[in-house]
């Protein structure tokens, strides 16, 4: 799932709903992503997969690789 296309989406797609609506996915706080994982559930479809990838990158400290791709 670590395809270039998904990394670009993390840097360009905006959160469509919730407390952080309008924020680019890679800029979402780690705590918010953990909330989906632990308290709520991941959104269905591609958005959920992208948010899971985002959390994995943040946990590993690799989110800095995605940030230069932001427009």
Image (cartoon, rainbow, N blue to C red):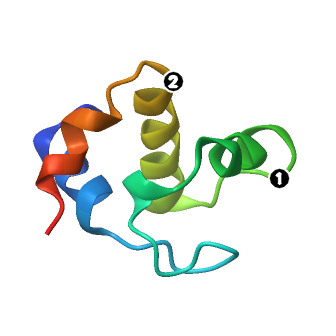
**View extreme (right): residue:** 39
Please report the residue visible at 60 percent of the width from the left and 72 percent of the height from the top: 20
How many numbered discs? 2
The answer for how far apart the CA atoms under marks 1 and 2 are is: 19 Å
Q: Is residue 70 left or right of residue 55?
A: left
Please report the residue visible at 51 percent of the width from the left and 24 percent of the height from the top: 59
Decide: few, some or many residues near mark 2? Use Cα within 10 Å; few <14, some 14-19, many ≥20. few
Q: Position of residue 46 (x, y in %)?
A: 43, 58
Q: Is residue 34 left or right of residue 12?
A: right
Please report the residue visible at 42 percent of the width from the left and 59 percent of the height from the top: 25
Q: Which mark is residue 40?
A: 1
Q: Is residue 14 above or below residue 35?
A: below
Q: Is residue 6 above or below residue 63?
A: below
Q: Are marks 1 and 2 in contact (CB under 8 Å)?
A: no
Q: Secondary structure at mark 1?
A: loop
The quarter of the rendered structure image containing the C terminus is bottom left
- Give the image quarter of residue 4: top left
According to the picture, the residue beneath numbered tag 2 turns out to be: 59
Decide: few, some or many residues near mark 1? Use Cα within 10 Å; few <14, some 14-19, many ≥20. few
Q: Which mark is residue 68?
A: none
First in sequence: mark 1 or mark 2? Answer: 1
Name the residue nearer the viewer: 64 or 18: 64
- Give the image quarter of residue 8: bottom left
Q: Position of residue 6 (x, y in %)?
A: 24, 48
Name the residue nearer the viewer: 32 or 37: 32
Between label 1 and label 2, give the one nearer the viewer: 2
Q: Secondary structure at mark 2?
A: helix
Please report the residue visible at 25 percent of the width from the left and 67 percent of the height from the top: 12
């Amino acid at each position: 799932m670590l395809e270039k296309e998904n990394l670009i989406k993390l840097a360009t797609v905006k959160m469509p709903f919730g407390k952080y609506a309008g924020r680019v996915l890679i800029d979402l706080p780690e705590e918010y992503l953990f909330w989906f994982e632990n308290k709520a559930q991941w959104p269905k479809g591609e958005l959920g997969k992208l948010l899971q990838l985002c959390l994995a990158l943040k946990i590993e400290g690799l989110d800095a690789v995605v940030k230069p791709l932001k427009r």
